[in-house]
Each structure stands twice: as C-alpha cells, then as structure tokens.
Image: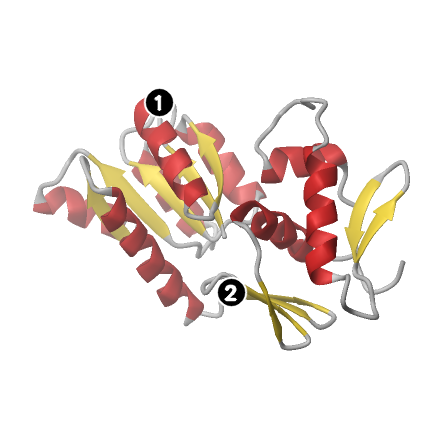
Amino acid sequence: MRVLVIEDDNDVASYLNKGLKESGYVVDVCENGKSGLHMAKSEDYDLLIVDRMLPEIDGLTVIKTLRGEGLKTPVLVLSALGEVDDRVQGLRAGGDDYLVKPFSFSELLARIEALLRRSQQQDVITTLQVHDLEMDLLARTVKRSGQSIDLQPREFRLLEYFMRNPGQVLTRTMLLEKVWDYHFDPQTNVIDVHISRLRAKIDKDFETHLLHTVRGAGYVLRETA
C-alpha cells in the first residue's frame, strides 16, 4: 500500500515516515502543499495524509482541488485545530477522516486501516495478480498456486512494486527510490541480495519462473523470460 504524507513539520513527518514503513507501507513525504498536490495527481496512492496548515497551498485547498478533479483516494486530515467547526471544515473540504494532533500512532494506524477497508468497498484495488502469483494488500499475504509464501516486510514491498508494474523493466535506480527510498546509488548489493531471496521464494519450486533479469537494464516480473 502506498501512502503520501503531506506534512511540513519535520519531526511529525519523520515520525509518520518511520512508523508507516515499519508497518509495511510504502511512503512518500512532501513538505508543502504545492509539491503534495502535484505528487497526489501524478502518482498512484492508496491513501493521503494531509496536514491542514501547509506552506504555499494549505491542506484544505489541496484536498478541495483533488476532489474537484475527481480524485477519490482516501484522505486523512491531520491538524492541531480540534474544535468541532475545524473538523467539520476538514470533512466538508473532502477529507474522509480528521485526526487531531498530538495523536497516538496506534490510533493513526487504526484509522488508516478503517479508511482502506471502506475504500475496498468502493472498488479500490486491494489484490494484485500476475500469472498464478497473488498478493492481498490488506491482509499482506502472498500465495502462488494456492501455496502461502512468507515474505519479510522489505521483500513484500519489493514484490508489490513489481506486481504493480507487471511486464515493465524496473531499473536499479527505480527500485532504490521506490522500495528503499534512496535517491542515490549507495553502491551496495542490497538489491541483488533481495532479488535472490525473492526468487528463491516465488520461483524456485515452480515450473514457470516470473522474476527475470534483463541484462544491462534491470528486472521484470512476467510469465516469459
């Protein structure tokens, strides 16, 4: 599941980024409304977490703009403003839920899970499938030919990125940015190690191999080599 956090407070943004990643989410963070609006419109997210008071474009305007352009992605509004009128304004702007700062992370997760369950009922994609490989994004389970496959959180994120882009060659840079949040190449073998582990789990015991190396380019998830 991909989450976009639009939050200008560095401490809060870091707290959310760390906690959500540890909970298995893929997270992008923006520190102002203008950049957040652009990312929300140009990328595919399952949930937006939007601070109400943002520089350049305030959070409610961001939400209103997205809703006006037809974006239905669930939005959780964060704000230090907790009066009834403030919450009503946030919900009327197009927010699906409103959480007042300071908050507990366990409550934040519970609200996220509730929003994702609700969006599931609105035909938001919660399962991915390539050939006989299936991923349940809410239950966070993976099966191949009906057999359960146990993945570590990073392996799950890596496979999710492949399954969201079947047949597309994913470069080392793309994997580092989207799965490891590195915006530079640290010159390690971290990708090779995780690709090897993932292959051993999803391909080793099956006749059709799905995860292929494209020499000089990257990796691809597809039925044929």
Label for residue 10? 1
- Kindly identify which residue carries mark 2: 126
Residue at image coords 38%, 23%: 56
> SS class of the residue under badge 1?
helix
Residue 77, percent across and down?
28, 44
Residue that sits furthest to the bottom in the current view: 146
Q: Is residue 168 something that shows in the picture?
A: no
Cα separation, mark 1 vs mark 2, equals 30 Å
Residue 65, percent across and down?
41, 43
Neighbour tally class for label 1: few under 14, some 14-19, many 20 plus, Cα within 10 Å? few
Residue 56 appears left or right of 207: left
Residue 184 appears left or right of 8: right
The image quarter containing residue 150 is bottom right
Q: Amino acid at mark 1?
A: Asn
Check whether the beta carbons of the residues at disc 1 and disc 2 lie within 8 A of each other: no
Q: Amino acid at mark 2?
A: Thr
Residue 213 appears left or right of 66: right
Q: Is residue 114 something that shows in the picture?
A: yes
Residue that sits furthest to the left in the current view: 83
- Viewer-side residue, 19 vs 70: 19
Residue 137, percent across and down?
51, 61
Residue at image coords 44%, 57%: 72
